[in-house]
Amino acid sequence: MEQTVTQQPRLSLSKRPSSDFQYQEMAEFIPENEDSWRSEVIPAVSDLVLTQPGLGVTTTTVTTITQTGGDWSTGLFDICSERNIGILGALVPCCLDLSLAHQFGESFCLPLLPGSTFALRVGIRERYKIQGNVCDDWLTVCCCYPLALCQMKREMTKRMKTKSYHVITALDCS
């Protein structure tokens, strides 16, 4: 919680502080009369902070992923549901693999590593809590590589649809 300081405490000049130790410490700074204050003894404070820095406008973005759990949303041989993905998977599966790695949040270089597509499939299944096991993932990637890529890309596209809410809060400094 931020607070605005509206009044600074004033320096009180007393000839006798509460303890003798404090009095001995401050003895050289306490003048005999108020007219004998010199600027060399106690430095003058030139810039007093009376308010905290401005609070401004705060923007918060809340993002929720709507679908998790269940089975794969499309089948392995369901290549006609999104034709662009099917064509990419049939003609240039390496480009589809690069796109899928980037969409998953990994490096573009991931598909160059051996077994990376298998790891990506397991990662997608784990992230979205899709039913299955590692043996099924391995068989799907090894035996039906282009079809597995198409299914993974369709799944990522379908499950990555999010709802975003923008909350703007304006705080007044007065």
Image (cartoon, rainbow, N blue to C red):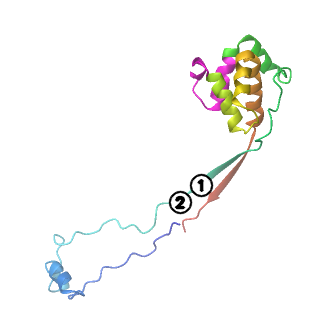
Residue shown at the point (82%, 23%) measured from the top left: 82
Mark sitting on residue 6: none
Q: Which residue is mark 2?
A: 55
Q: Amino acid at mark 1?
A: Thr
Q: Are marks 2 and 1 in contact (CB under 8 Å)?
A: yes
In the rendered image, the vertical position of residue 121 relative to residue 166, given as above or below: above
Q: Amino acid at mark 2?
A: Leu
Judge left or right: residue 6 versus residue 57.
left
In the rendered image, the vertical position of residue 170 relative to residue 156, given as above or below: below
103 inside magenta stretch? yes
> Which quadrant: the C terminus?
bottom right
Residue shown at the point (61%, 21%) measured from the top left: 115
Specify the segment rendered in magenta.
Answer: 95-115
Judge left or right: residue 24 versus residue 103.
left
Residue shown at the point (54%, 65%) measured from the top left: 173
Q: Residue at the top extreme? A: 91
Q: Which residue is mark 1?
A: 58
Q: Position of residue 104 (x, y in %)?
A: 65, 31
Crowding near pointer 2: few (<14 within 10 Å), some, many (20+)? few
